[in-house]
Image (cartoon, grey):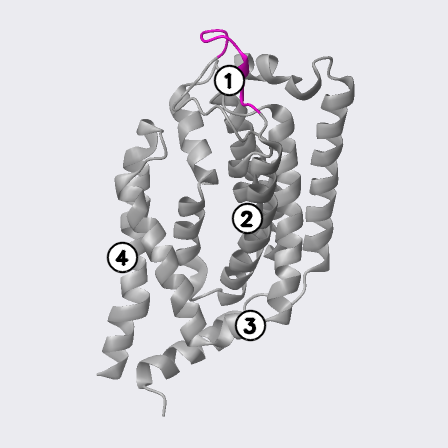
């Protein structure tokens, strides 16, 4: 026998799933084209950039240094896995298909990004270039440069949103935002441009694969127990934002505000409103 709260959630998930298409052929084409463009740019930098793997870094890093560092810190934290999980909470109940696709795509992206990083163990700019020769914002990470994990994460999150978006302007906005997050990794001085292109390409492909996996595992959308497990996981990710700003102090307050809003939203949607309905 199902309790009223569980039944209410099951009905909400069924209604929410209908808001988004099961398949978005146009969305997949956009993501595949974006991945191809990023891969082509990355290969082009490697072959014709003049500095091989390091091509384009100093020029872009110097160009981006003309903008306030706060902007880059705010942008770069959008590639933090905890931030994207926290943002996903706002979609979880009303768009469970998108939420589940994000989870599936994230699992693919983890295998891609975290699999290649230790395997290649490429040195980052702070390990190669002399201190003071480029703009460095935040912690100076030195290892596991390829691919850029923040770029992968941003491409997965905003790529899934672009996949389900119904208007071209929204797809373009999400793709440009993910690209800006990727480029912020060059701006803060911890990744080469090729790392970013590989991260964006891999993240976009992960979003497409995640959408395909989500279609084949509908229990992740409709099963209240599975849904709640990932909601709780996202809630813990939000809590983590209160104690760790990812090494970017200018983003600490916005992250705390985001976490507060997400946790209040989570409590409202999954605790307070169901209790009121039960009464």
Q: Residue at x 52, y 34 (%)?
A: 181
Residue designated by label 2: 110
Instruction: Single out the mark in the foreground, 2 or 3.
Output: 2
Q: CA gap, disc 2 to disc 3?
A: 28 Å
Residue drawn at x 72%, y 35% is 39
Query: Would residue 96 be found to the left or right of residue 7 on screen?
Result: right
Rendered view: 98 above or below 18: above
First-in-chain label (3 vs 4) = 3
Earlier residue among tags 1 and 4? 1
Task: Identify the residue under disc 1.
Answer: 127
**Quadrant position of residue 251:** top left
Q: State how far apart marks 1 and 2 are (Cα).
A: 24 Å
Where residue 95 is drawn, which disc sits there?
none
Is 169 located above or below residue 133 in the figure?
below
Q: Residues within 10 Å of mark 4 (few under 14, many from 20)?
A: few
Dot 4 falls on a residue whose secondary structure is helix
Residue 263 image position (x, y, % from top left): 29, 55
Looking at the image, is mark 1 or mark 2 nearer the viewer? Answer: 1
Q: CA distance from mark 1 to mark 3?
A: 50 Å
Residues in magenta? Answer: 123-134
Label 4, on which residue?
264
Label 3: which residue?
18
Of callouts 1 and 2, the N-terminal one: 2
Nearest to the eye among marks 3 and 4: give it. Answer: 4
Decide whether residue 132 is among the magenta residues: yes
Q: Position of residue 223 (x, y in %)?
A: 47, 76
Residue 42 in which image quadrant:
top right
């Amino acid at each position: 026998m199902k309790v009223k709260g569980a039944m209410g959630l099951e009905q909400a998930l069924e209604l929410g799933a209908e808001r988004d298409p099961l398949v978005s052929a146009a969305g997949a084409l956009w993501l595949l084209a974006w991945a191809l463009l990023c891969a082509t740019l990355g290969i082009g930098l490697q072959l014709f950039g003049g500095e091989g793997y390091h091509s384009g870094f100093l020029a872009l890093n110097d160009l981006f240094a003309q903008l306030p560092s706060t902007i880059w810190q705010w942008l770069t934290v959008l590639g933090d896995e905890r931030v994207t999980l926290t943002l996903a909470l706002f979609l979880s109940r009303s768009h469970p298909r998108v939420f589940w696709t994000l989870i599936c795509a994230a699992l693919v992206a983890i295998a891609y990004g975290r699999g290649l990083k230790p395997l290649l163990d490429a040195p980052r700019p702070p390990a190669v270039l002399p201190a003071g020769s480029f703009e460095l914002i935040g912690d100076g990470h030195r290892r596991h440069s390829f691919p850029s994990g923040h770029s992968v994460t941003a491409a997965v999150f905003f790529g899934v949103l672009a996949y389900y978006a119904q208007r071209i302007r929204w797809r373009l906005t999400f793709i440009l935002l993910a690209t800006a997050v990727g480029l912020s990794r060059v701006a803060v001085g911890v990744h080469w441009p090729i790392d970013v292109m590989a991260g964006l390409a891999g993240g976009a492909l992960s979003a497409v694969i995640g959408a395909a996996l989500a279609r084949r595992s509908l229990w992740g959308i409709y099963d209240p127990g599975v849904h709640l497990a990932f909601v709780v996981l996202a809630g813990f990710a939000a809590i983590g934002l209160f104690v760790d700003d990812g090494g970017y102090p200018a983003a600490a307050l916005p992250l705390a505000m985001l976490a507060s809003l997400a946790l209040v939203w989570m409590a409202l949607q999954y605790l307070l409103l169901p209790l009121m309905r039960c009464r």
